[in-house]
């Protein structure tokens, strides 16, 4: 009974983990491009 409950909750949890990790990944690339943009801006100034 408890095992089944854990499996169910983990199945519900898995997609959110995937979306969370993909969010973090896109966040990192976004932060990188922002950093590059800031560096370029400061270099232009």
Image (cartoon, rainbow, N blue to C red):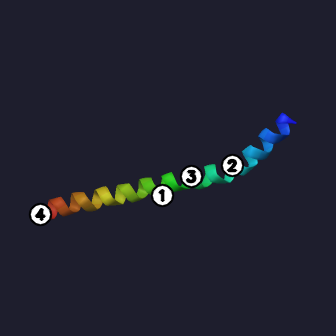
Q: Mark 1 vs mark 4: which is more N-terminal?
A: 1
Query: Where, by quadrant of the figure, is residue 15 drawn?
Result: bottom right
Q: Which mark is residue 14?
A: 2
Q: SS for tag 3?
A: helix
Q: SS for tag 4?
A: loop
Estimate how packed mark 2 is, as few (under 14), some (14 to 19) or many (20 or more) residues with alpha carbons within 10 Å. few
Q: In whole angstroms, how far apart are the C-alphas of marks 2 and 3?
A: 10 Å
Q: Mark 3 vs mark 4: which is more N-terminal?
A: 3
Between label 4 and label 2, give the one nearer the viewer.
2
Horizontal relation, residue 33 to residue 24: left or right: left
Residue that label 1 marks: 26
Residue that label 3 marks: 20
Horizontal relation, residue 11 to residue 26: left or right: right
Q: SS for tag 2?
A: helix
- Whether tag 1 and tag 3 are in contact, CB under 8 A, the answer is no
Q: Mark 1 vs mark 3: which is more N-terminal?
A: 3
Q: Quadrant of the N terminus?
A: top right
The residue drawn where x is 81% and y is 41% is 5
Estimate how packed mark 3 is, as few (under 14), some (14 to 19) or many (20 or more) residues with alpha carbons within 10 Å. few
Estimate how packed mark 1 is, as few (under 14), some (14 to 19) or many (20 or more) residues with alpha carbons within 10 Å. few
Q: Which mark is residue 45?
A: 4
Q: In whole angstroms, how far apart are the C-alphas of marks 3 and 4?
A: 37 Å
The residue drawn where x is 19% and y is 63% is 41
- Whether tag 2 and tag 3 are in contact, CB under 8 A, the answer is no
The residue drawn where x is 85% and y is 40% is 4
Q: Quadrant of the C terminus?
A: bottom left
Q: SS for tag 1?
A: helix
User: Extreme right residue here?
Assistant: 1
Q: In whole angstroms, how far apart are the C-alphas of marks 4 and 2?
A: 46 Å
The residue drawn where x is 36% and y is 55% is 32
Q: In whole angstroms, how far apart are the C-alphas of marks 1 and 4?
A: 28 Å
């Amino acid at each position: 009974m408890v095992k089944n409950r854990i499996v169910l909750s983990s199945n519900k949890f898995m997609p959110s983990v995937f979306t969370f990790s993909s969010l973090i990944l896109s966040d990192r690339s976004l932060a990188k491009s922002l950093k590059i943009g800031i560096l370029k801006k400061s270099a232009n100034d």
